Amino acid sequence: MSSTPKPAHVAAALTAVYLIWGSTYFAIKLALPDYPPFLLTGTRMAIAGGLMLAWLAWRRAPLPKRGQWRAIVILATVMTVLSNAFVNVAEQTVSSGVVAIGVAAMPLWAGLFAALRGYHPNRIEWTGLVLGFLGVVWLNLGSELRVSTVGLLCVIAAPLGWAWGSMWSKGRDLPDSLVLSAWQMAFGSVISLAIGFGIGERFTQVPGTEATAAMLYLALFGSVIGYSAFVWLIKHVRPALATSYAYVNPPIALLLGALLLDEPVNSHTITAMMLILISIGIVTLGKRLHGG
């Protein structure tokens, strides 16, 4: 990490990925099926990437260096396409809360990938990561899992791709966070649209107002604000803290389901939510004690 980030900046970035990304699972559910999975990712990333590239052009920000383009395309493929579009595919047959729980396993995969690259989580952080994973497992015990084979594979693959991309980017020669985010979204959009049209996805009708509003929310808030905040976190804080959002997103996804879809929330769910929130406190404590 090139410099010590200000606590206020870290808090603001964490708030963005905690709250905004927690709500994206619900927004994806609203956008489907008017927007097919890969075309949904391609459309939202085209809007988000286009806006960010226009802003960077207005600021006369330099283009990525020649040697950085390959890394940008790789990250766009595994993080923007693999992870994001696969979540969309999963939510076609799996509830948003279950998908959020599956994605919450990502910090554990990130911890393993980080260890392979020399960024070893300390014991306190591992305690928090394991406790958080137990919390999301408990969150879903006893509930009915209506998981199709494709949905299940996507739920497993999405956090794996995101974790690998997050850790692979560490120490790479990459452009500034905003430049990286913009070009990653732009390339991710092209790849997603190509895959979508290639596998036969089409807009069979003009998307409805609700679905389009959800897509725009995903583009502006989920991508421009949330994604930029996460890229900044990956470059400035320890991996365990940067990926701790995955433990907050499931409770938010379930809460939105309860408030907006009248889904039940019982004491079992509340207990799991408390475990998850406690795990984040432990991860944060581990960061402070070890100066990460």
Image (spheres, grey):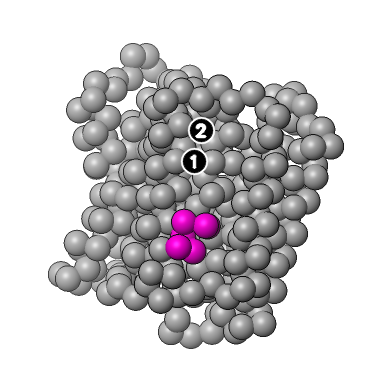
Quarter in which the C terminus is drawn: bottom right
Instruction: Tell me, yes or no, if residue 270 can be seen here.
Output: yes
Label 2 SS: helix
Q: Amino acid at mark 2?
A: Ile
Above or below, comparing residue 117 to residue 244 in the picture: below
Camera-nearest residue between 196 and 185: 196
User: Which residue is painted at 70% across and 42% down in the image?
Assistant: 138
Classified by dominant secondary structure, the portion drawn in magenta counts as helix
Q: Farthest residue toward the right?
A: 267
Q: Which residue is mark 1?
A: 218
Q: Residue 108 colored magenta?
A: yes
Q: Farthest residue toward the top?
A: 204
User: Which residue is painted at 25% across and 56% down in the image?
Assistant: 74
- Specify start and end residues of the magenta stretch as a single range: 107-112
Query: Gap in Å between the C-alphas at discs 2 and 1?
Result: 8 Å
Q: Which residue is mark 2?
A: 28
Label 1 SS: helix
Image coordinates of residue 197 in percent, x first then y, are: 23, 27
